């Protein structure tokens, strides 16, 4: 029988712990971004709220959630960047609808 370098109870798990922590943080980010996107769609399409009001409401909620969950400055920058992207897309939609 071949000898193994594994000794029960002596395995380093720091890398596995960091990977699990990173996976959980990425999952939380993805779930929150999905929540904000679905919320924006519900407010604009189902409720009939003005797109700018819904955008400000969802961006504010995203920043408040990020601060409450201690997600840091990267989360706030991501929410602001996504709100800026939504603003550009909505303005392009407005321009193309005026052209037609």
Image (tube, grey):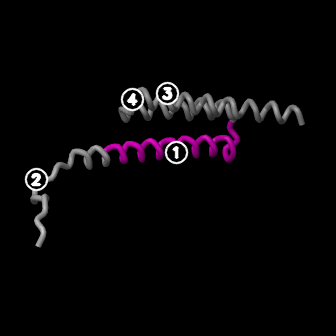
User: Label 3 belongs to which residue?
Assistant: 77
Sequence-wise, the earlier of marks 3 and 1 is 1
Sequence-wise, the earlier of marks 4 and 1 is 1
Q: Quadrant of the N terminus?
A: bottom left
User: Label 2 belongs to which residue?
Assistant: 10
Q: Position of residue 95 (x, y in %)?
A: 81, 30
Tag of residue 90:
none
Q: Which residues are magenta?
A: 21-49
Tag of residue 72:
4
Residue depicted at 40% across the width and 30% down the height: 67
Sequence-wise, the earlier of marks 2 and 3 is 2
Report helix, strand or loop for mark 1. Answer: helix
- Distance, label 4 to label 1, CA atoms, is 18 Å
- Asked if disc 2 and disc 3 are in contact, CB closer than 8 Å, the reply is no
Residue 39 is drawn in which quadrant? top right
Q: Is residue 22 magenta?
A: yes
Q: Is residue 25 magenta?
A: yes
């Amino acid at each position: 029988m071949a000898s193994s370098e594994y000794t029960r109870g002596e395995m380093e798990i720091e890398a596995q712990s960091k990977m699990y922590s990173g996976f959980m943080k990425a999952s939380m980010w993805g779930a929150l971004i999905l929540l904000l996107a679905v919320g924006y769609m519900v407010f604009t399409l189902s409720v009939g709220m003005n797109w700018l009001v819904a955008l400000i409401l969802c961006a504010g909620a995203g920043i408040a959630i990020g601060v409450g969950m201690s997600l840091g400055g990267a989360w706030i920058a991501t929410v602001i960047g996504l709100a800026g992207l939504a603003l550009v897309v909505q303005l392009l939609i407005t321009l193309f609808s005026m052209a037609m």
